[in-house]
Every structure is written in C-alpha cells, then in structure tokens.
Amino acid sequence: MAAASSSSTESPKTTTERRGIPGAQFVEDVETYLTQTGFDVNSALAFLQERLQQYKLVEMKLLAQQRDLQAKIPDIEKCLDVVATLEAKKGTGEALIADFEVSEGIYSRARIEDNDSVCLWLGANVMLEYSCEEATSLLKKNLENAKASLEVLIADLQFLRDQVTVTQVTIARVYNWDVHQRRIRQIATSSTSKDS
C-alpha cells in the first residue's frame, strides 16, 4: 500500500514536463480550476487554446526531426554496407565496380581497387578520410545514436499527444461547464420573471 500511495503522489510531478514540453493539467472540477487560476471562462479558454497551439507547433517540429532521423538511419546503414563490402573485397585482387551519385539524378561509374581507407561525408561541407575499421566504428556509433534519438523522439511525441488530448478535453469541459452555468442562470432569471 505504501508503494502505491507514493507512486500516485509522484505521478503528477513526472507528467508536469518532459524535455521542455509542459504538461497539461486534467481539470475535474472546472469551478475549482477557475478559482485557483483566477481566470474567468473566456480567459481560461483563451489560455487553453494558446497552449494547444503551442503543443501543435512543438509537434510539427518534432515530426520534422522524426522525418530527418528516419531518413538518416537508412543512409547510415547503407554506408555501413558499402564499407563492409569494401572490406570484404580487400585483399582479393578483385576490383569493385560501383555507381555513385555525383549530383541529384546524375550518376557516375567507378572502379575501386584495393583501398585501405574511405572518405565519409560528415556534413557542413566536411569530408574526412578514415580507415575502414574507423569508418565502421564511427558509422555504428552514429547509427546507435540516431536510433536512440528516434526512440526518445517517439516518446516525446507520445507525451505531446497525451498533453494535446488532455488540453482538448479540458477545453471541452470548461466550455460545457460555461454553457451549463448560463442555462442555470437563464432558468433562474426566467423563473423569477414569471413569479413577478
């Protein structure tokens, strides 16, 4: 029992923020929420709509990062395969014939003799020459980092989607509470005017 109660007290803290993404508060009692925040209904709805837009903006950025990583991982795997093929051909005396992309849509054919090194494009107009072993090690490390980053990104997106859902539900609850309160006031004013 003690473990269950301690985990339930810790859960709100863990959902308040994840890597800079603020957590959304689920509102059970709208009247208490409005009193605690000091908002009127319109201000609360405006705040929640703004928060929802912030979540959507962050989601767009995370989805762009996810697309970039998903494109990067196959490229790294392809580079690993090429380096492995070069290592396999090394010492056999057999040349490797390869087609490579010079520019978008423009390819050239190359004959690769025994070679102890490869050049890796690091980005930012930087290319470095590595031995095949160093290149394999670097590419494997980059592949592991990219996969780990993708996992974290997917978890961030799931957290963000949960926050969007909670915020949308809260907006609906605040709006419905306001409609209900207006109906009660309307009924009260119409019954007092009938009594008069």
Image (tube, helix red, strand yellow):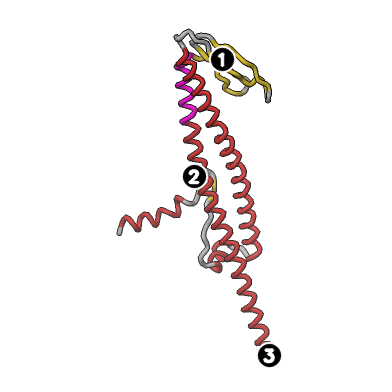
Secondary structure at badge 3 equals helix
When asked about the image quadrant of residue 45, the answer is bottom right
Q: Are marks 1 and 2 in contact (CB under 8 Å)?
A: no
The region drawn magenta spans 131-144
Question: Can you identify the residue that label 3 sits on?
Answer: 194
Label 1 Cα crowd, 10 Å radius (few <14 / some 14-19 / many 20+): few
Closer to the chain start, of discs 2 and 3, is: 2
Question: Can you identify the residue that label 2 sits on?
Answer: 155
Question: Which quadrant is the C terminus positioned in?
Answer: bottom right
Disc on res. 40:
none
Q: Nearer the viewer, mark 1 or mark 2?
A: 1
Task: Label the magenta part by its dominant secondary structure.
Answer: helix
Q: Residue at x 56, y 66 (%)?
A: 35
Question: Can you identify the residue that label 1 sits on?
Answer: 97
Secondary structure at badge 1 equals strand
Label 3 Cα crowd, 10 Å radius (few <14 / some 14-19 / many 20+): few
Residue 73: x %, y % from top left: 53, 31
Q: Is residue 141 magenta?
A: yes
Q: Is residue 124 above or below residue 186?
A: above
Left or right: residue 163 compared with residue 182: left
